[in-house]
Amino acid sequence: MKLGQGHAIFTAECSHSFHFHCIASNVKHGNQICPVCRAKWKEIPFQSPASDVPNGRSGINPADWPRDDTWTTVVQRLPSPRLDSTRHISSLFHASEPGTFDDDEALDQQQENPQQSVTDNDGSKSNSIGAIEVKTYPEVSAVPRANSHNNFAILIHLKAPYASGGLNGRNQSIFSSTTQNSRAPVDLVTVLDVSGSMAGTKLALLKRAMGFVIQHLGPSDRLSVIAFSSTARRLFPLCRMTEIGRQEALQAVNCLTSNGGTNIAEGLRKGAKLIVDRKWKNPVGSIILLSDGQDTYSVASPGGAHSRTDYKSLLPRSIQHNGGTGLRIPVHAFGFGADHDAASMHSISEISGGTFSFIEAEGVIQDAFAQCIGGLLSVVVQEACVKLECAHPNVLINSIKAGSYRTSMMADAKTGSIDVGDLYADEERDFLVTVNVPVDESCDEMSLLKVKCNYRDPITKEILSLEENNEVKIQRATVVGQPIVSMEVDRQRNRLRAAEAMAEARAAAEHGDLTGAVSLLESCRRALSETISARAGDRLCVALRAELKEMQERMANRHVYESSGRAYVLSGLSSHSWQRATARGDSTDSTSLVQAYQTPTMTDMVTRSQTMFFGNPPQRKLQQAQSFPARPRPSLSSFSPEVILAYILLQLLPFYSQIGGI
């Protein structure tokens, strides 16, 4: 403590400072958590009458301090949490890093023996997942016998099961402490930009967002943090987020300072090395990369040039999306603000099979992180693969439209596959396959395609497959009335058409033709408005048109495109190509589409982020999907004065940080 203009200042071990009488009053009511970063304090401020001072000591009253006979302040030492004797606690900041990052904390015994089932109170096993739901929709239900169809569309729809043990986003929170063993634990490496441009509000909000992430990781999850500026450093190895692990992580994050340049390449290289070198492996692994600037360093490209960073060379082939191995480590990249390198961040995410999010408004960073980990903490399917086989000798596969997912087709066009990978609880995927329908005068019903699906249970490691093949059939009649096009097929055609228009517009904009880019988007908007689903008032079609309109506005001129248009378009392309929710700017016009891919567990986590402190700051606009309404937010009257005071201090935190107050 120190004297300050008549008010004592208490600085906690997490580095945050408070007026002593404010925070002591808060602690008096049993709150031993930092209101800023949520770290649990070992030493707390304590107020009591002088006669109640511990150990019977009277109040300390140096001659030059004002006398107060009513209250005396002391610092009470809390008992240290009992440490696990087998756990090695290393320094948060290594003086020198090891050459190989194989010093990760061992997994707990239950995770090392995944075949041991978790048993519910009723004796039933709860660690097995349900089956993937597979549905198929032919473009039309009947084709005349005498007619052929060269590009007949078939929609393949997948839906992942609920979280294991009957846990789902509607009835029970997947993030509760009682259900940590009912989901696949995660190895999460966060690679964070702490360059000079992150100083002030940005760094303060990043710390708060990381605090939220740390709070929601369970004791079986492991976290490591890498900070980069001109160089990169690992703050601590992969550690389990037990109570002690969380405290270490919070302290490390709170000690971050911003300075230097932006060496994304070095941060990414170190994050990938940590994932590859780790001795133990949780079932789910991922890297979160955040940066607000352009890479001010470069690495050699395969041809020897140094003009632009070759990020693909930084990611080991073993963790690349098309690397050909079973190890999948997506890099979920977050571009922060108007000055980040959206093209590079999007490239990194695409190579690894991750998503790219554009954080335009500073206050959205915590919500964006919340949405991402809401998915990572609910993986129920891994290594999913859809197998396609023609069911008629004269039927051939023409195309498989699956966005960024890897597809393959045999030379005879009779079989093909879609490499889907991981799925979050309740997550859905839609793929369009086109085949030729031959003339056939001999049958009333024709089988076109057989669909199979194999996948791995991330908890038991068991390979599962659908018991029955899903066979696509159509009617063949001599005379067929006016065909009725499947609404499901039409919706997905619209989505793919919009995504193609976005990609073409982006290419035109990069070549300086903004007028042509806007024209492409407008043509697509008009085409969508004439489709069957648009005339039926389909919400997805309405949202697609709104998104295209937003992109047109962000291509109004070169300045707007450079500052936000490019990042907005790329985050949209990332979302559509992977059919996964991404954060996108701060616009509300296309929010329903931005969150069209949001799962219930993502929605729940975003809701937690937005209701953590009384409600939303005005600039936070990453909203929930319309089908999952937000929880009622508490009113101020339901909180104690001490909690309200802590909230006020938190809201002032970004302003204090700008003037060196913290």
Image: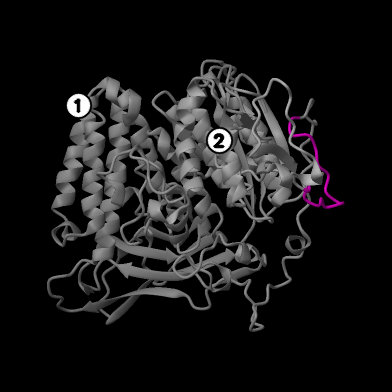
Task: Give left or right: position of 39 versus 133.
Answer: right
Task: Using the image as rendered, state which of residue 494 and residue 653 is in the foreground.
Answer: 653
Assess disc 1: are there few (<14), some (14-19) or many (≥20) residues with their C-alpha within 10 Å of its C-alpha: some
Residue that mark 2 sits on: 207
Residue that mark 1 sits on: 515
Q: Tell me residue 551's x, y (percent).
A: 26, 36
Q: Which residue is rendered at x = 42% and y = 33% of the image?
A: 362
Q: Earlier in the sequence, mark 1 or mark 2?
A: 2
Q: Tell me residue 277's x, y (percent).
A: 74, 40
Q: How is the image coloured?
A: one colour
Q: Does 83 lie within the magenta span? A: yes
Q: Does 543 lie within the magenta span? A: no
Task: Using the image as rendered, state which of residue 594 and residue 441 is in the foreground.
Answer: 594
In the image, which residues are magenta? 79-93
Q: Secondary structure at mark 2?
A: helix
Q: Tell me residue 466's x, y (percent).
A: 52, 74
Q: Tell me residue 39's x, y (percent).
A: 63, 43
What is the three-letter code of the residue carrying label 1? Thr
Quadrant (top left/top right/bottom left/bottom right) for the N terminus: top right
Q: Is residue 255 above or below residue 416?
A: above
Task: Give left or right: position of 354 versus 517.
Answer: right
Task: Using the image as rendered, state which of residue 541 and residue 641 is in the foreground.
Answer: 641
Assess disc 2: are there few (<14), some (14-19) or many (≥20) residues with their C-alpha within 10 Å of its C-alpha: many
Q: Which residue is rendered at x = 24% and y = 69% of the image?
A: 140
